[in-house]
């Protein structure tokens, strides 16, 4: 994999995460907004961490 390919992959992942994060801003209640953003982060880690690594219970 070239540096350019890795850069494109990382940019794509960052765009997807930013979009999901911005969508969660639609909640007016700060608790709901925080819960939605935690889920975005959790799903991100779940997708990219190896199966034997757990970031959350």
Image (cartoon, grey):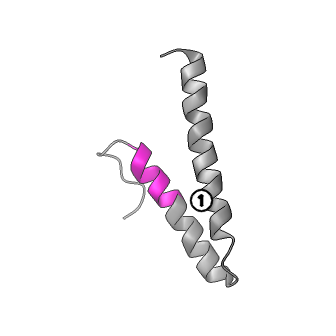
Q: Quadrant of residue 32?
A: bottom right
Which structural element holds mark 1? Answer: helix
* Residue found farthest to the left: 52
Q: Which residues are magenta?
A: 41-49
Q: Main secondary structure of the magenta part?
A: helix
Relative depth, front residue between 25 and 55? 25
Q: Position of residue 47 (x, y in %)?
A: 41, 48
- Return the residue found at the far top: 2
Residue bearing the label numbered 1: 20
**Image point (62%, 44%), residue name:** 14
- The answer to whether residue 26 is left or right of residue 8 is right
Is 51 located above or below residue 20 in the figure? above
- Residue at left offset 55%, top offset 22%: 5
Tell me residue 21's x, y (percent). 63, 60
Q: Which percent across, then down, holds residue 34?
A: 61, 73
Instruction: In the rendered view, tell whether residue 12 sits above or below residue 18.
Output: above
């Amino acid at each position: 994999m070239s540096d350019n390919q890795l850069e494109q992959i990382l940019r794509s992942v960052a765009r997807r995460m930013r979009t999901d994060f911005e969508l969660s801003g639609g909640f007016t209640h700060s608790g709901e907004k925080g819960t939605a953003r935690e889920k975005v982060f959790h799903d991100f880690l779940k997708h990219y961490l190896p199966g034997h690594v757990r970031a959350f219970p």
